[in-house]
Each structure stands twice: as structure tokens, then as C-alpha cells.
Image (cartoon, rainbow, N blue to C red):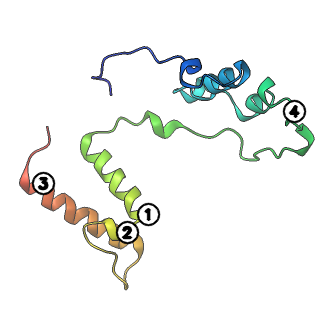
């Protein structure tokens, strides 16, 4: 994505011509790429767009505090990114992994076996840049 040219975003008003100014403002604040600049849930619920629906006494609050986005700070090399993608795929669809999970082993053992086999296959065929 860093290699793509910078392009100004289309105004939300053009993309959603029938949306109210309050809705567009809320969308703009919710769609901020950087989590630290994004509107919080409490701020969003108090936004004028939700004035008819907002009821602070009837809205539960997360007891865990703010979410931790520090995982986004990890600098991922190509190999590590591939491993993470395979792990994610394996959690949702183990049958999509190069080797299906074994019935005797745990899901984690099967996933690790599948990942190591896919690494072995890919490392023999070409080198990473």
C-alpha cells in the first residue's frame, strides 16, 4: 500500500448523497484509519446523529477498558505475514490448510505441522526477496 500513489478520498457526501450532515460527520470520525484518532464508542453514542436513540442509562459499558492496538505496531516481514495469514485461515477453515488437522493431535499441533510443511514446500521452490 505504501507504494500506491496518494489519492485524495472521494467526499463522503458524493458516495452517500442522501445521508444527513450528521451521518456524514459520524462516518468520517468512525472511518479514521488510525485507531488513536478514531472516535470512541462513547463519543459516537453521544454524537448528534444518535440523539433520538442515545440513552446513557440503558447502554452497557465495556469493563475491559480501551482496546489494545499495539499488535498493529509490529513490523511484519513477508514470511511472518504469510504465517499469520495461514494461522488465521486455520482457525476458521482448517480444511483449507495444506494438510487437514489430524484427529489424534490437537488443532494447534495440526496447524503447526501444516505451517511447517507449507514452509518447507515454499522454501525449496524460491527465495524471499
Front-most of 53 and 128?
53
The answer to whether the residue labelled 1 contacts the one labelled 3, judged by CB atoms less than 8 Å apart, is no
Q: Which residue was labeled with disc 4? A: 52
| SS state under label 3 | helix
Q: Is residue 124 left or right of residue 24?
A: left
| SS state under label 4 | loop
The answer to whether the residue labelled 2 contacts the one labelled 3, judged by CB atoms less than 8 Å apart, is no
Residue shown at 75% from the left, 45% from the top: 62
Q: Which residue was labeled with disc 2? A: 94
- Which is closer to the viewer, label 3 or label 4? 4
Q: What is the CA distance from the residue labelled 2 to the residue labelled 1?
A: 6 Å
Q: What is the CA distance from the residue labelled 2 to the residue labelled 3?
A: 22 Å
Residue shown at 27% from the left, 67% from the top: 114
Tag 4 or tag 1, which sits nearer the N-term?
Answer: 4
- Which is closer to the viewer, label 1 or label 4? 4
Q: What is the CA distance from the residue labelled 1 to the residue labelled 4?
A: 40 Å
The quadrant holding residue 37 is top right
Residue shown at 85% from the left, 35% from the top: 54
- Which is closer to the viewer, label 2 or label 3? 2
The quadrant holding residue 104 is bottom left
The answer to whether the residue labelled 2 contacts the one labelled 1, judged by CB atoms less than 8 Å apart, is yes
Callout 1 crowding tier (Cα within 10 Å): few <14, some 14–19, many ≥20: few
Q: What is the CA distance from the residue labelled 1 to the residue labelled 3?
A: 24 Å
Q: Which residue was labeled with disc 3? A: 123
- Which is closer to the viewer, label 4 or label 2? 4
Q: Is residue 106 left or right of residue 46?
A: left
Residue 67 lies, in percent from the top left, at: 63, 40
| Outermost residue to the front | 18
Callout 4 crowding tier (Cα within 10 Å): few <14, some 14–19, many ≥20: few
Q: What is the CA distance from the residue labelled 3 to the residue labelled 4?
A: 58 Å
Q: Which residue was labeled with disc 1? A: 91
Amino acid at each position: 500500500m505504501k507504494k500506491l500513489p496518494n489519492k485524495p478520498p472521494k467526499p463522503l457526501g458524493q458516495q452517500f448523497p442522501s445521508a444527513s450532515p450528521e451521518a456524514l460527520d459520524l462516518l468520517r470520525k468512525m472511518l479514521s484509519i488510525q485507531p488513536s484518532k478514531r472516535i470512541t464508542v462513547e463519543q459516537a453514542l453521544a454524537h448528534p446523529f444518535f440523539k433520538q436513540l442515545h440513552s446513557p442509562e440503558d447502554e452497557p459499558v465495556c469493563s475491559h477498558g480501551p482496546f489494545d492496538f499495539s499488535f498493529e505496531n509490529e513490523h511484519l516481514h513477508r514470511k511472518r505475514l504469510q504465517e499469520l495469514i495461514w494461522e488465521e485461515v486455520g482457525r476458521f477453515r482448517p480444511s483449507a490448510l495444506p494438510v487437514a488437522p489430524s484427529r489424534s493431535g490437537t488443532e494447534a499441533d495440526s496447524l503447526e505441522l501444516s505451517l511447517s510443511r507449507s514452509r518447507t514446500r515454499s522454501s525449496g521452490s524460491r527465495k524471499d526477496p
